[in-house]
Amino acid sequence: MDPAVTQPLAETPPNLYFTDSGETFEFQTSAKSGDGVFRFRWTLEGGKKGPPEHVHDHERETFSILSGTLRIWIEGTPRDLAPGETVTVEKGQRHRFLNPAKEPVVVDVSLDGALQEDVLVPLAIHLGGRRKMKVGDVFTLMAHVTEVEASRPPSRFMRGVFGGMAGLGRLFGARPLPRVGPWPAVVRD
């Protein structure tokens, strides 16, 4: 077993909430077991943007809309997706989001690898279901994200800002989170 990975989890990780960006992550399958795909249900509240523009260099990401409308920009080109529609963002493509409606958009997301799982699941465990991150949590997240390298900002300037914040956090004791092994799948309708 990879020394950066702890033992498998006995239960599904807690949901992850980013209140400021209006996001909820409900984990479904671990990429570290089964078919090698990390799956989660992502809810983005009305009028919210979710994560800023980013790139996954090592994983393809697929979005399947269950309800609501998701506007996604891939390589700068916007596209609105409705229930029943699916889009895949290839490795290395810049992408960002917006929920242009008042109601939440609910999306099933899958990534063909464990890197994003190694970011989100340890953070969910660290936060333990808390809906608000403290300042120390933000620096821990920065230190963790820069070590795992599941995604990155597309601009060199923003990568420098992000790396600088992670370095500052490390000076004050922020450390990457321990990665976790596989966990039981959740069956959702």
Image: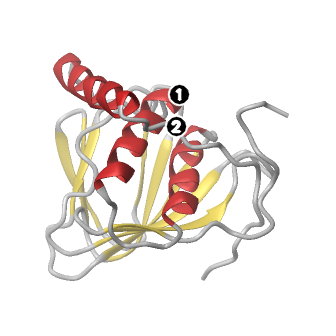
Residue annotated with mark 1: 58
Residue 102 higher or lower than 113, as above or below: below
* Distance (Cα) linking label 2 and label 1: 20 Å
Q: Toward which corner of the image does residue 165 lie, by quadrant?
A: top left
Dot 2 lies on which element? loop
- The amino acid at mark 2 is Pro
Q: How is the image coloured?
A: secondary structure
Residue 159 higher or lower than 13, as above or below: above
Residue at 32% in and 59% down = 134
Residue at 24% in and 62% down = 21
- Image position, residue 132 (x, y; %): 32, 68
Quadrant placement of the C terminus: bottom right
- The amino acid at mark 1 is His
Residue at 30% in and 36% down = 54
Q: Dots 2 and 1: beta carbons under 8 Å?
A: no
Residue 171 higher or lower than 97, as above or below: above
Residue 120 higher or lower than 142, as above or below: below
- Image position, residue 17 (x, y; %): 39, 68
Dot 1 lies on which element? loop
Residue annotated with mark 2: 176
Q: Nearer the viewer, mark 2 or mark 1?
A: 2
Q: Toward which corner of the image does residue 154 lie, by quadrant?
A: top left
Task: Specify whether 18 is left or right of 59.
Answer: left
Quadrant placement of the N terminus: top right
Task: Specify whether 33 is left or right of 62.
Answer: right
> In this view of the protein, which residue sits in the foreground, 62 or 162?
162
Q: Residue furthest front?
A: 172
- Image position, residue 118 (x, y; %): 59, 43
